[in-house]
Each structure stands twice: as structure tokens, then as C-alpha cells.
Image (cartoon, grey):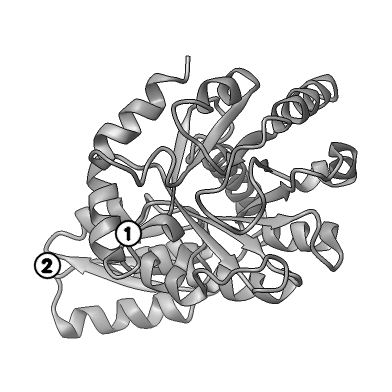
Amino acid sequence: GDKIARGWYRRGIVLCSSGIGVSIVANKFPRVKAALVHNEHMAEMTRKHNDSNVLALAAGELTIESTKPILKKWLFTDFEGGRHQKRLDQITEIEKNLMRNVYGIENGEVKISASLMCGDQLNLLEETNKLVNAGIDFFHIDIIDGHFAANISLNIDHVFALRGHTNIPLDIHLMVTNPKDYIERLATAGADMITIHLESEGNILEILKDIKSKGIKSGLAININTPIEELYPYLEYTDLVMFMCIDTGFKATPFKPEVIKKIRAFNHYIKDKNYNITLAADGSIGPRTISELYNEGVRIFVGGTSGLFRQGSFEENIKNLRSHCH
């Protein structure tokens, strides 16, 4: 279901004893239309009328011989569209509305995103397991090319590996000169959110459109010295704006208090213009800074060495960060 939801495959087949359980699970994934089929007629109708892309079979009831014509009918029957298309379009729109809130980035919930570049690089698998058990909301993966920022961090291989290990949303932060070159590969790797820098090269608007066209949340990051007015032309295609609270590309650097004024002004602007954009903050997020950021409208906080990867358990540190958001 996940591979079809991400566009890796067009169709799939699942089976269990009754077929019921696997069809329920498959339909939990966005853009999946799983149908439990027992005979050729059902196989034909679910393709013609519902454009099903996952075939669920009851292995406990079907034989190899009875399954063959069902498979043939389902695989070689095309969707007819017509009067059925309107209903499917309505389902797609409902699904989109649900997915807007699936990560809580548009309903005001506080989300903590673990910055994996701040973790123990020799034990990242163990760290991610602990974070999942502690209730982390997102995994924040910084990809730095050494040119946009004078550092090297994680890469697309980490995204592939992590996607195969967890369903926790993957929040990708591209600190690269040419973000366009990364979008297709990150979509294939399983990114849920991709944030590019306003200061990057290339056609920012087209890159944001490309991200959204792949069903991925689009974000714009802004450096501490960049005026917020430079964000305005891109807000129609932006799901979140992330304010850098430190100098870009390095961990454990001092918080820049001037970012508070920028966030306040930007929050007033998007409210006045009625934009539904989530605010995020990255850099030196800890007990001393998170409260003021929250009061200015930030709802996604990237947890690094100041608040998450520090003394104490991940569970304790997540709880501590949340306790300052009120």
C-alpha cells in the first residue's frame, strides 16, 4: 500500500486467509483503492467502476485454479470513467482534506521533529528506535551540500533507509545550492515534507510546485538575515515556512533573538492575507527559547542538541519541550 501511495507501483495484490484484514490495512494509505474480490464479476466491476489499484484476495477460500481468472479479469480490465469519475473525484478531494491534517501541520498541534544530524551517527538506528518509542512526531533530515552551507550532513540514502524502517513522517531540509536536482529522488525515497531554502538557486516557485505535484508537503526555509518580504511571492504554493534561528548548517550554535521579530511580523502578514501556512523553527530549540517561539505562532520545532539530544531520556526531553508550549 505504501509503495502505491508513493507512486512507486501502479497496482498491487495482497492476500490473507479472509482477505478482509489486508484490504482494511491497504485502504489506510492515501491514493489506495483496495477491493476484496471473490469472483470474476467482482474483479471486473471493481476495475470498471472504482478504478481499484489493489486487489485483495481470500487465500483461505480460493484455489490456484479459481484465482487465475480473477487475476486475469482484474489485470486486463480498464476503468471506464464516465458517470463513476465524479464519485471518485469526490473521494479524492475528501482524501486530500484528510491528508492536510494527517501530520497535524495545519490544525495547530505542536510537533517535535528530531534533527538526526544531532544524533549519535554511529548508532542512528538505535537512536531512531528510541525516538519512535518516546513519541517523536517527525524525523528531520538535513541534507547539506557543502556549498550552500559550509558543512556536510546526511544524504538521500539516509532517507531511503529510514523510510524502510519507520512510518514516522520524514521532514527533509535541503541546505543545497540547487534543490531541483534532489526532488525526484527524495520523492522516490519516501519524503513526506521537503523544505527548500529561499536563498537557493533556481526557480523557487517551480520547485515548490514540483514538490506539491508529488503529493509532498512543501516548505520554505528563510535565513536569519533574509527579509520576510522575499517569501511573499511563493506563499500560494507553500505549506510551511521554517525560520532559521541560528547560522545555517551547524549544530550547537547560539540562538539569534532577532528572529522573534521576524516571525511575529510574518505571522501577522499571513493572518491578514488569510494564508493557511504552518510556522516552523530550526536551531537552538530548547526550554529557554521554545515558549517565546510558540507564543509567536510556531508549531513545528526542530529538536537538536539544545532540547532533544541532551542529558535525559528522549521521552523526558520531548515532554519538557511540550510543557513550555502553552
- Badge 1 vs badge 2, beta-carbon distance below 8 Å: no
| Residue displayed at 31% across by 82% down | 69
| Residue displayed at 69% across by 34% down | 277
Give the side of residue 115 with respect to residue 275, left or right: left
Residue at the spot of label 1: 166
Q: Nearer the viewer, residue 234 or 307?
A: 307
| Residue displayed at 79% across by 29% down | 266
Identity of the amino acid at label 2?
Glu
Q: Which mark is residue 64?
A: none
Q: How many marks?
A: 2
Give whichever of discs 1 and 2 has the lower sequence position.
2
Q: Residues within 10 Å of mark 2 (few under 14, many from 20)?
A: few
Residue 103 seen in the figure:
yes
Q: Quadrant of residue 149?
A: bottom right
Q: Which mark is residue 61?
A: 2
Q: Quadrant of residue 34?
A: bottom left
How far across and how far down the image is residue 79, in percent?
57, 67
Give the side of residue 60 with respect to residue 245, left or right: left
* Vertical relation: 94 (above or below) 194: above
Mark 2, secondary structure of its residue: loop
Q: Nearer the viewer, residue 271 or 244?
A: 244
Q: Nearer the viewer, residue 147 or 207?
A: 147
Residue 41 seen in the figure:
no
Distance CA(mark 1)–CA(mark 2)? 33 Å
